[in-house]
Image (cartoon, helix red, strand yellow):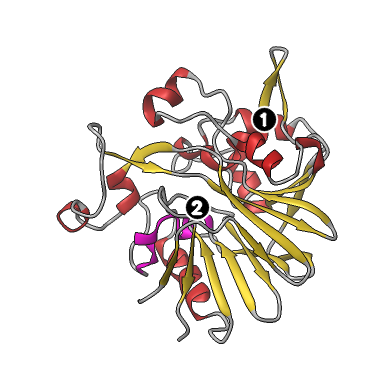
């Protein structure tokens, strides 16, 4: 699949809203797990590993300024990782708050937080430490989560326990009144749709922004890196490879007459690509 690479696009204008894309901080994760069933003999020359066999991941987040309010998609890694997280993931300092302010938003200005799913690198930034206490980073925001995702995060089974092991943010959300549960596809505002796909997690959802001539997908860990544009290349963390592939097919085939952008949530050197017209 040929595609145009957009190296440093941080802002996109739609008819009814503005979109900002920024990196809230990098971390490292196991390269083999990210490549899933693809043998290392195939990917080792195109993926740079550190001495522990990890590859660098970004956390590209998305802020949407709309008539309905300011909408943040995912929150990235936590602002104060513990020693276990540091040892496993070597996370950089989160720049979530600083980048939002560059985009013209304080933490109190966020009206909605949409979680694609609740793994630590997507939900960690939902809380911060203040005066020795854990509090929500976005105190006035409704945090939108798929029903299946919320239930498995609160009580993970053996298959999912490791994925939700860093649960400080999840517990803080549970104790708040700021959680809005949806069950299936959901229209948050005109042109802003949440689409439940499953695949990477039980309640995985992607975000689709659309106007008359263009569409932008935020597929999160359905397509975390450019290499994952290959239909068959799915993460070892995916609970259902078939659902992940189906979600990719939906994105690749959606309204090819329009300009179609895809945010690469974890690609370290770029945040956005444009898909070719079919």
Part of the protein shown in magenta: 220-230
Instruction: Pick the quarter of the image with the C terminus.
Output: bottom left
Magenta-colored stretch includes residue 205: no
Position of residue 260 relative to residue 222, above or below, is below
Which residue lies at the image location 50% right of the left edge and 52% below the top edge?
265
Position of residue 172 relative to residue 278, above or below, is above
Q: Tag on residue 47? A: none
Describe the element under mark 2 as helix, strand or loop: loop
Examine the residues drawn in magenta and state their main secondary structure.
Answer: helix
Judging by the rendered image, the residue that carries numbered circle 2 is 265
Which residue lies at the image location 55% right of the left edge and 74% below the top edge?
260
Instruction: Pick the quarter of the image with the N terminus.
Output: bottom left
Residue 103 percent coordinates (x, y): 69, 46
- Please state if 115 lies on the left or on the right of 105 as rendered: left
Pick the front one: 127 or 93: 93
Disc on the earlier residue, 2 or 1:
1
Q: Tag on residue 127? A: 1
């Amino acid at each position: 699949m040929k595609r145009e690479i957009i190296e440093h696009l941080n802002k996109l204008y739609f008819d009814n809203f503005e979109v900002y894309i920024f990196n809230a901080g990098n971390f490292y994760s196991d390269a083999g797990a990210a490549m899933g069933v693809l043998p290392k003999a195939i990917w080792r020359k195109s993926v740079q590993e550190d001495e522990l066999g990890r590859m660098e991941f970004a956390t590209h987040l998305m802020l949407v300024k709309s008539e309905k309010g300011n909408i943040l998609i995912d929150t990235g890694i936590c602002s104060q990782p513990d020693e276990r997280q540091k040892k496993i993931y070597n996370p950089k300092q989160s720049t979530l708050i600083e980048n939002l302010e560059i985009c013209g938003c304080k933490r109190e200005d966020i009206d909605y937080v949409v979680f694609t799913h609740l793994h630590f690198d997507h939900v960690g930034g939902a809380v911060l430490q203040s005066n020795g206490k854990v509090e929500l980073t976005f105190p006035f925001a409704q945090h939108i989560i798929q029903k299946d995702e919320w239930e498995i995060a609160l009580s993970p089974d053996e298959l999912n326990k490791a994925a939700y092991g860093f649960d400080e943010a999840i517990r803080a959300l549970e104790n708040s009144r700021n959680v809005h549960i949806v069950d299936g596809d959901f229209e948050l505002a005109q042109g802003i749709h949440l689409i439940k796909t499953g695949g990477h997690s039980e309640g995985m959802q992607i975000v689709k922004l659309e106007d008359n001539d263009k569409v932008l997908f935020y597929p999160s860990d359905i397509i975390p890196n450019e290499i994952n544009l290959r239909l068959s290349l799915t993460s070892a963390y995916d609970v259902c490879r078939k659902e992940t592939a189906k979600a990719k097919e939906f994105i690749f085939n959606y309204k090819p007459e329009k300009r179609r952008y895809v945010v690469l949530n974890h690609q370290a050197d770029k945040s956005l690509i444009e898909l070719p017209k079919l």
